Image (cartoon, rainbow, N blue to C red):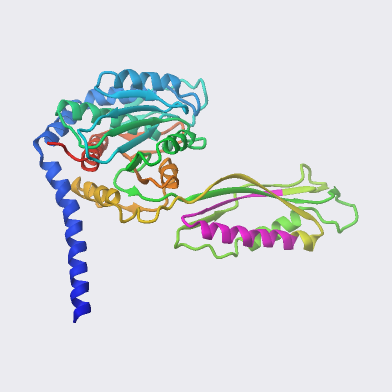
Amino acid sequence: MRLFLILLILFLSVQSQAQSHAEQVKTIQDDPRVKAAFDHVDKNRDAILHEWIAITEINAPSKQEQERAKFIESLLRKHKLEIRYDSAGNLIATRKGTSGGPVTVFDAHMDTVFQPGLKIKATVRDGRVYAPGVGDDTRNIEALLATIRALDAAKIKTKGDLVFLFTTDEEAGMTGAKQYTKDNKGKVDYYVALDGGYEGFTYAGIGINWYRHHFIGPGGHTRSRTPPYSATLPLARAIARIYELKVPTSPSSNLNIGMLGGSEVPNAKAADAWFTVDLRSTSNDVIADLEKKIAMILDEEAKRAGLTVKTDVISASPAAILPGNRESDLVKIAEAVHRAMGFDPPIGNAGSNNSSAALLQGINSISTGAGPCNDSHALTENCEIDPLYKGIKKLLLLEVALAGLAP
Ligand SMILES: [Zn+2]
């Protein structure tokens, strides 16, 4: 009986906590200033679209973000913000809070994956805007700018500082976010990476490791004595065995062998036969375990064919899991904001963006986005226009709910 009572009290307190996050968000959403800010977004739809296109048309390959940064800076200068750059070229604009609230960072990355010199011209048709980079991540840059204007127009003050962080080099290694989160570890309470996403958000990052495995042998003519074999033999056997490995679905994990190569001509045994492995998991233990099993297979098959094995790591980034993040106020408030905006949010743990950099520094972090887009990283990239305005309102509500609405 006593146990039952304790469980009941626990259940009720969890319930009321959940309610309190929802109520807290609802109160903010109903505040006349927030309503005025939402109206401001609706009244400025055309201006938002034009500015979004203007930023998109400044191509900004990774590590060449300066021109785009200068343009964004010129837009930020129209507002009461503390503006600076850091050593990684990140553009940082702080909207000071009145005091006593959490420091909340909103990150959108400035860089694109497109080659330097590419001329970008956006076109609008059928309710969509088409241009390389329009979604990833320019939609979120524009969404942040639109929220700053709406917050100012509605005279909204937050308790905590809102930091608008326009990062460099997300696509090529997240060096911008890594630098910022390292420099500001302990000074940031919440870190929201805006990159992809619309209806939901993620609270952890998936680990991604890429390897190139080589079998090395003497090679030789087709008619040379066998063995030694072509290095393709242990490769084929190893690939077949690697695909027999059990890859867990929970925690979410993936394994793919996407590339392979051998001899350059049909009439030679391969002296170097290689293949790539793309190994992903939300658990670093799973990655380590599969890595070990793959290494064992490679060794066995190399020995069996009388050859040797060599492994290059093309790139490695660990899974970013912060204990307690799923139960943090950040995640609870984010969930309440999404529900308040009419979304039934998918909440995932397999993000792959700047949020990982924050989580790996021990900063509570999520990632989400301001609108639905297609074909990211392709020249045909495009976004729906209409949902962006709702996405901007969602972001604004998230900003105010996290940093706290000041009287
Ligand atoms: Zn991106």
Where residue 116 appears, x then y in whole percent? 52, 23
Residue 53, above or below 216: above
| Image spot of residue 35 (x, y percent) | 12, 36
Which residue is at a point 73% across and 49% down the rendered structure image? 273
Tell me the magenta residue range.
Answer: 274-301
Above or below, 88 relative to 306: above
- Label the magenta part by its dominant secondary structure: helix
As rendered, which of 317 and 328 lies closer to the eye? 328
Residue 222 shows in the view: yes
The quarter holding residue 164 reads top left
Residue drawn at point x = 14 percent, y = 29 percent: 154
Q: Nearer the viewer, residue 289 or 186?
A: 186
Observer-nearest of 362 and 196: 362
Is residue 32 toward the left or the right of residue 290 in the image?
left
Quadrant of the image containing the C terminus: top left
Decide: is 139 above or below 228: above
In the depicted structure, whether residue 289 falls above or below residue 35:
below
Question: For residue 288: magenta?
Answer: yes
Q: Position of residue 88 (x, y in %)?
A: 47, 28
